[in-house]
Image: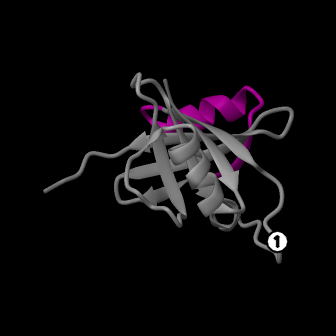
Amino acid sequence: MELAQVRLLVTDFSRCYQCYAEVLGLEPQSGAVNGPYEKFSPATGSVGIALQDRAMMAGILGELGEEPVGHRSLVVLRVDGLDAYCEQATSRGAELVHGPAPMTDRMRVAHLGDPEGNLIELQEWLLLRP
């Protein structure tokens, strides 16, 4: 398992983007000033911080309403064998919130809740086939 990022779920994406890029000086990976997702890399090359529009995550979790509510952040962990990892975690008492399910053509994810209701995203990166 590897810590991949800490992701902040934000409502005002553009203002938050400006804060992390211009105020804190972190390097954006794609330049998606208006979102809905951007990962920032610190100069030291350590684990990054990502911003994601709260409404986007609410949609993934099936929590859409008039206003995105609930989660404001999540910890992202990369794992090998997502299905087996989820089975082990739930057998030890973890709460499976969503998934395992495809997130992109390169990644599958599952979301767990910790005892305080914090969200944990488990990512399994897939090999691209030519």
Q: Nearer the viewer, residue 28 or 63?
A: 28
Residue at image location 26% in from the left, 45% down from the top: 127
Label tally: 1
Q: Do we see residue 30 in this rendering? A: yes
Instruction: Describe residue 128's horizontal placement relative to residue 24 as left or right.
Output: left
Q: Which residues are magenta?
A: 79-98
Name the secondary structure under disc 1: loop
Residue at image location 39% in from the left, 25% down from the top: 45
Query: Residue 22: x, y in percent?
Result: 52, 46
The amino acid type, in three-letter code, at marker 1 is Glu
Q: Quadrant of residue 80 in the image?
A: top left
Query: Going by the picture, which residue comes out furthest to the left?
Result: 130
Is 88 within the magenta? yes
Instruction: Describe residue 60's horizontal placement relative to residue 5 as left or right.
Output: right
Q: Quick one: quadrant of the C terminus?
A: bottom left
Q: Do we see residue 99 in this rendering? A: no
Q: Nearer the viewer, residue 15 or 68?
A: 15
Query: Residue 55: x, y in percent?
Result: 69, 67
- Crowding at dot 1, Cα within 10 Å, few <14 / some 14-19 / many 20+, comes out as few
Q: Which colour assignment does the render follow?
A: one colour
Image height check: is 84 above or below 7? above
Q: Quadrant of residue 20 in the image?
A: top right
Q: Quadrant of residue 12 in the image?
A: bottom right
Image height check: is 123 above or below 62? above
Residue at image location 59% in from the left, 47% down from the top: 110
Residue to which mark 1 is pinned: 67
